Image: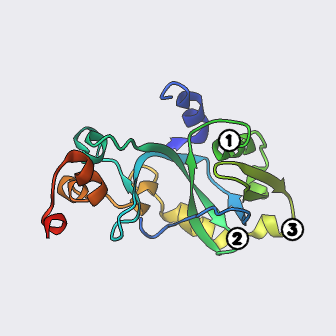
Amino acid sequence: MHRIGDYFSNVSEKVGQALGEIILTYNMDEIIKVFSDFVEEVKLHFSMNEETRGYYKCLGKDCPACKAGIRPSVYCLLPVYNVAQDAIQVLRMSVVKGPRKIFSLVMGCFDDPKIYKKLVKITRDGRSSYKLEVFESDRAKLAGVDKIKAFLDTFDTEKSNLTDIYPLYSVDEVKDMPDVSRRLGVHTDEQTE
């Protein structure tokens, strides 16, 4: 875990199952409350396979998906309070920068010292284009106070990982994924039947 200021100052140089992930879909608003400046970086692959569909953690230098030419994407994870869900969730942001990229927009929120007392409305309006609206309201000050406090009281930034919301498969499990094994030229028993 890093403080967001530390992370953002270094990112240009780097070019729990208990938590849910905020899934940003087209033209759907999510209203969140930012309550922490702790972020965590993660490299993820995406599986199109029926049984493992979704993101999973890259295994690093021994990763069969990487060896098969499936490049991982780098994301920044930020814990937030999702107002509609009344839950602490993880906002996954690609670290790609740009004027309508979520990473740049959310990073800009931290320029406001009162961001922790406001709500943020995120709207996805394209494949990778977003709009952010920051606003104050009486509701913003009280939104999720109990859940945020409970999370902060129990989440140990030295021992806990936001990345735990994504599965970590073994080398053999990744190798056996059809999209990986096909690219590696490896045939599993399932594919030969």
Q: Which residue is mark 3?
A: 138
Q: Between residues 11 and 111, which one lies in front from this camera angle?
A: 11
Mark 2 or mark 1, which is nearer the start of the sequence? 2
**Residue 32 appears in view:** yes
Relative to 125, say whether 148 is above or below: below
Mark 1 or mark 3, which is nearer the start of the sequence? 1
Hey, what amino acid is under mark 2? Val
In percent of width and height, residue 17 lies at 42, 68
Q: Residues within 10 Å of mark 3 (few under 14, many from 20)?
A: few
| Disc nearest the viewer among 3 and 1 | 1
Q: Tell me the element at label 3.
A: helix
Q: Which residue is mark 1?
A: 107
- Along the horizontal axis of the image, is 69 left or right of 187? right
Residue sitting at x 49%, y 67%: 19
In percent of width and height, residue 150 lies at 56, 69
| Disc nearest the viewer among 2 and 3 | 2
Toward the front, the furthest residue is: 193
Q: Tell me the element at label 1.
A: helix
The quadrant holding residue 18 is bottom left
Relative to 14, say whether 43 is above or below: below
The alpha-carbon separation of the residues under discs 3 and 1 comes to 24 Å
Hey, what amino acid is under mark 1? Met
Q: Which residue is mark 2?
A: 83
Q: Between residues 18 and 193, which one lies in front from this camera angle?
A: 193
Hey, what amino acid is under mark 3? Asp
Residue sitting at x 63%, y 36%: 97
Residue sitting at x 15%, y 61%: 188
Q: Residues within 10 Å of mark 2 (few under 14, many from 20)?
A: some
The quadrant holding residue 192 is bottom left
Is the Cβ of the residue at disc 1 closer than 8 Å to that at disc 2? no
Q: Tell me the element at label 2.
A: loop
